[in-house]
């Protein structure tokens, strides 16, 4: 396996004060537990020159309203990957994280429906798209 791509497709968000325990646990399982377990299962089988690409989110750094479990899990996974890179970089295993900003998904639908939000983000993108 030269490259492993870890991506969680489901991401629910809610205000911290109203998010139910089940919703919180599902989000954490989707966004950190699954990718973490994949790393544990995969990393020892990888050879020098292998790479792991993790799909994260800019929300790990900048945060988004009403997405506490999601943004916290993404930030946590990015930190885990830094630690794995520290530990396995000497074996020639490379780790990368891709962190898109405002990708159109069910989680970001409210932002895309709010006038001006997408335009404000696009203005900040170096390529303007």
Image: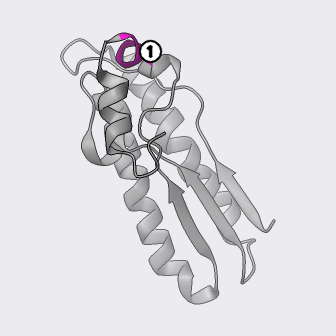
Query: Magenta span has 61?
Result: no
Please name whichever residue, 129 or 77, is drawn nearer the observer in this view of the structure: 129
Query: Magenta span has 112?
Result: yes
What are the residue bounds of the magenta stretch?
109-113
Relative horizontal placement of residue 86, taking residue 121 as reference (left or right): right
Q: Residue at x 44, y 15 (%)?
A: 109
| Image coordinates for residue 56, horizontal then vertical, percent | 48, 46
- The extreme bottom residue here reads 90
Q: Where 31 sits versus 99, above or below?
A: above
- The extreme right residue here reads 1
Quarter holding the N terminus is bottom right
Q: Where 55 sits versus 88, above or below?
A: above
Relative horizontal placement of residue 81, taking residue 49 as reference (left or right): left
Residue ID for mark 1: 109
Predominant secondary structure, magenta span: helix
Q: Residue at x 41, y 17 (%)?
A: 112
Dot 1: element: helix
Q: Residue at x 39, y 46 (%)?
A: 125
| Image coordinates for residue 5, horizontal then vertical, percent | 68, 52
Q: Where 55 sits versus 71, above or below?
A: below
Q: Residue at x 29, y 31 (%)?
A: 120
| Image coordinates for residue 53, horizontal then vertical, percent | 61, 58
């Amino acid at each position: 396996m030269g490259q492993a791509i870890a991506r969680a497709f489901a991401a629910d968000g809610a205000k911290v004060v109203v998010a139910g325990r089940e919703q919180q646990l599902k989000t954490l399982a989707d966004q950190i537990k699954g990718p973490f377990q994949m790393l544990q299962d995969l990393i020892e089988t990888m050879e020098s020159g292998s790479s792991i690409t993790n799909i994260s989110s800019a929300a790990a750094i900048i945060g988004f309203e009403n997405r506490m479990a999601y943004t916290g899990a993404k930030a946590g996974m990015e930190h885990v990957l830094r630690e794995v890179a520290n530990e396995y970089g000497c074996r020639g295993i490379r780790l990368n994280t891709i962190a898109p900003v405002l990708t159109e998904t069910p989680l970001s639908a409210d932002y895309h429906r709010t006038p001006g939000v997408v335009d404000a983000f696009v203005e900040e993108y170096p390529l303007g798209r």
